[in-house]
Amino acid sequence: MIRPMKTPYLPWFLLFSFLTLASCKNDRQGPPAAAESAGEAPALPPREEDYEAARFKWGYINPAGELAIAAEFDDGRPFAEGLAAVRVEGRWGYIGKDGRFAIPLRFQGAWNFSEGRGRVLTYDNKMGFIDRSGNWVAEARYDDALDFQEGLARVRVEDKYGFIDTDGNMAIPARYEHASSFENGYASVKLEGSYGLIGKDGREALAPVYKKASPFQEGLARIRKDGLYGFADEQGEVAIPPRFENAQDFNQGLAPARLDGRYGLIDKSGEFVVPPKYQQLWYAGESLWGVEQEGRYGFIDAQGEEAITVQFEQVFSFENGFAPYRLGRLWGYLDHEGNLLTQPRFGLAWAFREGLARVATRTGIGFINTQGELVIPPRDNYLDLRDFSEGLALAQVYR
């Protein structure tokens, strides 16, 4: 579990929140139409006109902080598989890294490409999938869909869920009341009010008799029954009977579990190897577990020894070698040995992506490198920045 970041009070950061509103959906206002005056309902504008042009446009910067793709878009998403979804007024399409449109603006919604397929929403509120040329591989006939994962995408047909393959064929019929994406070869499904697991062939791997069931992790699936959590094995048998008030998946052979209001770590026999004494406990990467004790945060190892002193007011999990931490109102970064990459000097801190981490300073948002150096300082004309993906990062530009 990655702990949610508690946003500190940042007077200098309010400008960004205010400016973000400029790109939100706006209601059109003006004098009533003649038909409305006569008591008839006014004609609604076409769906593609529901969004007005944003006052401040989005483009993409390179790792040098220079604008690599001109700020011409009202909204955008990160690059994935060489393409990025962008919006101009009420239409979405895709651009390549040269900034040119690879797939024209013709959708009500568009999301990142995954496994060679892009999920899109048409103006009749149906979802489907296109290839990199913009051709349909799964016609837009689904009421809901998730991105492809492990070769399958969850789709909804009316009120039932199933899965399609990357050619658009229905691989697992839509007969479930709910379903998750596939993870580690399994998906959680709901049938007749209870949850179980299926494999990619659609066969039942865990009978739907639980109030909750998560895909197998290290050979065990987390289950909930009669309000308590336990674990089932890959043979569908209960390996650890439900007796915990809460539990998380196994990592490194251990799983956080709560008993009598406190968290500890259990092994695969279901016995506590680290006594339940923490208010929060989660796997944080780097073979460490994040813990909260009496309102302070730190990290322990698999033996329950304090690896990084419980002293911080908040921490994130480790990603790409570093974890953000908060002391007072300011954030910094540390490594898995507890060495500080930076002192607490940022208003906000995000995870490292492609060797750079986004940080909020008193003068705006910039990026630091893995030496803690501010390599892309805030600029007056960059109102907001997003994380790097495939060498480019979204930037909202004042001009």
Image: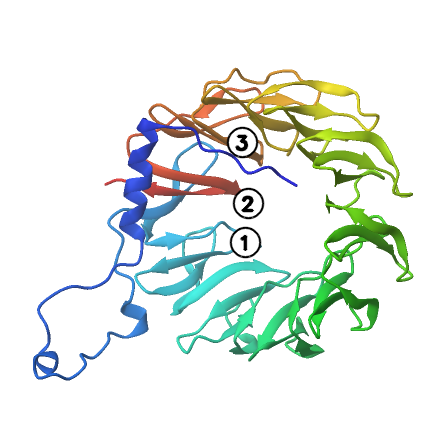
Q: Distance of mark 2 from mark 3, alpha carbons? A: 12 Å
- The residue type indicated by label 1 comes to Gly
Q: Which numbered disc flags the more N-terminal residue, 1 or 3?
A: 1
Q: Residue 296: x and y, percent?
A: 60, 23
- Dividing the picture into quadrants, the one containing residue 297 is top right
Residue 214 is tagged as none
Residue 390 is tagged as 2
The residue labelled by disc 1 is: 82
Mark 2 element type: loop
- Dividing the picture into quadrants, the one containing residue 276 is top right
Q: Residue 239: x and y, percent?
A: 90, 52
Q: Nearer the viewer, residue 263 or 136?
A: 263
- The residue type indicated by label 2 comes to Glu
| Crowdedness near tag 1: few (<14), some (14–19) or many (≥20) residues, C-alpha within 10 Å | some
- Dividing the picture into quadrants, the one containing residue 311 is top right
Q: Residue 109: x and y, percent?
A: 43, 65
Q: Residue 79: x and y, percent?
A: 51, 50
